[in-house]
Image (cartoon, helix red, strand yellow):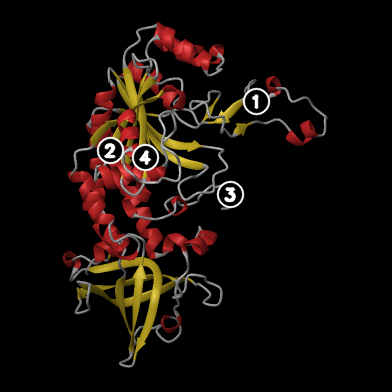
Amino acid sequence: MQVVEKLSVRAARQVEAIGRKVCVQGWVRTRRDSKAGFSFLEVNDGSCLANLQVIAPAALANYESEVRHLTAGCSVRVEGTIQPSAGKGQATELVADQITWIGPADPQTYPLQKKQHSLEKLRQWAHLRPRTNTFGAVARVRNRVSFSIHQFFQEEGFYYVHTPIITASDCEGAGALFRVTTLDLEKIAAGQMPPDSRLDFFGKPTFLTVSGQLEGEALACALGKIYTFGPTFRAENSNTTRHLAEFWMVEPEMAFYELEDNMELAERFLKRIFRDALEQTADELAFFNEHYDPTTIATLQKVIDSRFVRLSYTEAIDILQRSGVRFEFPVQWGNDLQSEHERYLTEQHCGGPVILYDFPATLKPFYMRVNDDGRTVRAMDVLVPKVGEIIGGSQREERLDVLTDRMRQQGLNLEAYDWYLDLRRYGTVPHSGFGLGLERAVQFITGMGNIRDVIPFPRTPGSAEF
């Protein structure tokens, strides 16, 4: 007696599956009935972009009662034999011996019918949109990128560590923090209890983290090379295609690394995850290339093949000022670069990725190492075409006296950061790190226009559904 194997749709579509007795489970995408007395079902289980064609003979016991009534969204279990297919774009098909209708989907209310919906409309059904081709493909690319991130750092000798999500420190100094509290805010507003942080759960003001960097530095100063990869939060009221209130960050920190080492690592890192995406999610990227951005694959390949150009911030300002382009935002030394400036540098002037370094100290947080000129810090931004900044990082300030001066200049409470200063008191070393937002990377890889479409459940101002 032939054993029935459970296979994914991806596995069942391979030539190697021909002749095997299998069980495939998934959701019906379409059903069409043949005049010859059988039906074609397209079944997908999320394992790949393509569907598996199922031949449902009229001889099935439940053909008239159930199979002919299957609609888009129904879940089914199909047992049968994989056979060669003469159909275009598929090597195999499944001839069913048995089809079990597991769960119905009312065709009158199920929203994902044949009609095309806008990406904005699909955000209203974030719980269902992963069943579409677009969002299934996004999820698989996101999975591949996440796996590649871990592979890269593990192969490079890094340790994966977990830094706090609840913190008392504002790493970026921007003040865009979500407060974490157990105090009764309604009673405070009504004057029925004092707004005293000492009465709060942790006995002091605490927040959702904007970065694991500061804690990562502590671990790097013990383990050498570490990375943290987890959720971070920004309470910025930014309704743009590039901002989220909750997103995922990978942040490596390396002891005994100077800025040049940091740049080399960031370049190797990006090339690795882009190469893996091209090789391991080729079908998905071909889909994005066809339906969303026809330059998706070519842009990734160009980044992989390019040597990232190094430009100081001062050199970049000079290039922009001499470009003859009338930018919306004025170009002046001491001003932050905008997306239009970054894209000009990558797409027009350099024709590929750029690493900017040595930014004005007034633009950057307290922890970045001050250069000998006293005006600039050892910061770096990695820029790529179409997006602009994709990585931000720096060499960290390892000198206690310089660091405390910078913190005072930015109005920080040194006592709150005393543990951070200890890293400079006890065995300080040059060290560096950077941060990559996972969603920014996935957005660049896929060519998707809105960052809300590369995370399963986007959190944005005024929106926290599901």
What crowding class fits label 2: few (fewer than 14 Cα within 10 Å), some (14-19), or many (20 or more)? many
Find residue 114 and report its horizontal and vertical position in percent.
44, 75
Mark whose residue sits in front, 2 or 1? 2
Marks 1 and 4 sit apart, C-alpha to C-alpha, by 38 Å
Q: Is residue 266 left or right of residue 74?
A: left
What crowding class fits label 4: few (fewer than 14 Cα within 10 Å), some (14-19), or many (20 or more)? many
Give the structural element (helix, strand or loop) at label 2.
strand
Nearer to us in this view, 297 or 307: 307
Find residue 441 and report its horizontal and vertical position in percent.
35, 45
| Label disc, if present, on residue 354 of the rendered structure | 2
Is 143 above or below relative to 264?
below
What crowding class fits label 1: few (fewer than 14 Cα within 10 Å), some (14-19), or many (20 or more)? few
- Label 1 sits on what residue type? Phe
The answer to which quarter of the image holds residue 139 is bottom left
| Image quarter of the N terminus | bottom left
| CB-based contact (under 8 Å), mark 2 and mark 4 | no
- Label 2 sits on what residue type? Val
Mark whose residue sits in front, 2 or 3? 2
Marks 2 and 4 sit apart, C-alpha to C-alpha, by 9 Å
What crowding class fits label 3: few (fewer than 14 Cα within 10 Å), some (14-19), or many (20 or more)? few
- Label 3 sits on what residue type? Ala
Residue bearing the label numbered 3 = 464
